Image (tube, rainbow, N blue to C red):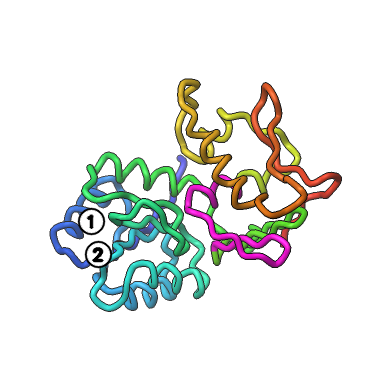
Amino acid sequence: MIVYAIMQILIVEDQEKIKDFLVEGLTTAHYTVQSTDLGQQAQALCKSNQFDLVILDVGLPDQTGFETARNLRSNGFMGAILMLTAYTSLDAGADDYLLKPFELDELLARVRALLRRPMIGNETPTVLNYGEIKMDLIQRKVVRNNQNIPLTTKEFNLLEFFMRHPEKPLTRAEISETVWELAFDPDSNVIDVYVNFLRKKIDSGFDKKMIQTVVGVGYVLKDNNKVAATL
């Protein structure tokens, strides 16, 4: 008989109706759930428990969800963070965001996608290095030649996929299925748009252009003869 580990989820939400909705929905989906309405208490709970995922509201009574996310990453939290927000871009260390209002099915889909990603552990590198780029997976920071490069959550996830497969041409289908968790739609240009966004931030101002187009295939992260390294 195969025994599956029950995923541990922490909900940080101060609106009782939303919190009860989340607890009931996730418990019914067979997750183990704890909840709190304070960011500081969430930080304390994450120090004493091994949560796989934190669902974090932006508006909290004691500190913002952005501050809480940054503090969790600074304290070494290695699980996923899903932010509940009215904003469309985040830079606080969250792995994904969900706009309010949302349906339970949409939430559960995001939760499943995040929990499929490997949690950063002792055997998993927390810093990726390739050529002039250094990517800190815990602090969610990217540096090129000592220059900080702010990225949105989706841009960060896209670059991480490139950094984990340097010098390998990646198809649009591979990018869509890994970064967006969606089947590739040949009628959509969303992959090209986001690669262009990322290029403007990663390559702008540098002589060496590292995100290159592979005609008829997709894109590749390449820096001459550099070899990928991890710390």
Q: Is residue 156 magenta?
A: yes
Q: Is residue 196 left or right of residue 190?
A: right
Mark 1 or mark 2: whose residue is earlier in sequence:
2
Q: Position of residue 193 (x, y in %)?
A: 52, 37
Residue 88 spot, x, y in % from top left: 36, 51
Q: Position of residue 5 (x, y in %)?
A: 43, 51
Q: Nearer the viewer, residue 182 or 132?
A: 132
Secondary structure, mark 2, is loop
Q: Quadrant of residue 121?
A: bottom right
How many residues crowd around disc 2 within 10 Å: few (fewer than 14), some, or many (20 or more)?
A: many
Q: Which residues are magenta?
A: 140-159
Q: Is residue 44 above or below residue 170?
A: below
Q: Nearer the viewer, residue 178 or 11?
A: 178
Task: Please say whether residue 81 is one of the residues in the magenta stretch.
Answer: no
Q: Residues within 10 Å of mark 1 (few under 14, many from 20)?
A: many
Q: Identify the residue at horizontal 39%, vertical 72% (top origin).
A: 67
What amino acid type is highlighted by mark number 1? Answer: Val
Provide the secondary structure element on which disc 1 rests.
helix
Instruction: Name the residue carrying label 2.
Output: 13
Q: Which mark is residue 118?
A: none
Q: Is residue 210 above or below residue 175?
A: below
Identify the residue under disc 1: 23
- Say which residue appears at 71% left-offset and 42% top-offset: 221
Question: How far from the left and from the top, in percent, is residue 43?
Answer: 39, 74
Quick check: 227 above or below 54? Answer: above
User: Closer to the observer: label 1 or label 2?
Assistant: 2
Q: 38 or 63, which lies in front? A: 63
| Image-based side of 191 in relation to 211, left or right | left
- Taking the image as shown, residue 114 lies to the left or right of residue 13, namely right
